[in-house]
Image: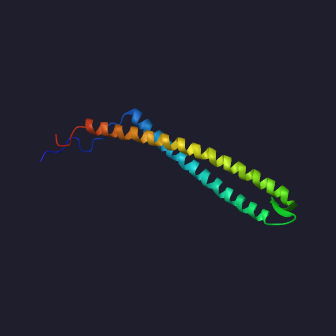
Amino acid sequence: MAENPQKGAKMQVPADVERDVADYQNLQRQLQSVLIQKQQMQIALEEVKSALESVEGTTGDVYKAAGGLLLSTTKEAAKKELVDKKEMFDLRIGQITKQETALSTKLNDLKTKLEAAAKRMQSSAPSPSS
């Protein structure tokens, strides 16, 4: 049985493919970061919605936390502040969703490109039976 001279030899990966792999990994990290930001914004939005419901169900003055203090404020002022926060979170979630979509598209395009490069490299590699 003859020893395979290719055994143990590494296939040479072109520099452009290595760059694409690094870009792919970077895009994955960016997407993960964006998804975490989006999740945090959604949690904060739910908290604001809950507080808004609580304020709407009260009469008279309400209290809000400011640092380590509880401050008295009017129902209308608290409601306006919460509505403004809700709008800000809605806007930010929309922006993050657009960013998420763009990153996902880039990732899918790069994945397709890398799969094609892998197929080309496999078909050009010498067969182990030679």
Residue found at x 76% / y 65%: 54
Q: Going 44% across and 39% down the picture, which residue do you hit?
A: 109
Horizontal relation, residue 55 to residue 118: left or right: right
Residue nearest the viewer, comparing 64 with 98: 98
Colour style of the rendered protein structure: rainbow
Q: Position of residue 40 (x, y in %)?
A: 63, 55
Seen in the picture, residue 80 relative to 116 is either above or below; the reply is below
The x, y position of residue 62, in whole percent, is: 84, 64
**Quadrant in the picture for the C terminus:** top left
* Drawn side of residue 50 relative to residue 81, left or right: left
Residue at position x 28%, y 40% in the image: 122
Q: Quadrant of residue 99?
A: top right
Whether 18 is drawn above or below 39: the answer is: above
Identify which residue, 3 or 126, lies in the foreground. 126
Residue 68 visible from this viewpoint: no
Farthest bottom residue?
Answer: 58
Identify the residue at image location x=54%, y=44%. Answer: 101
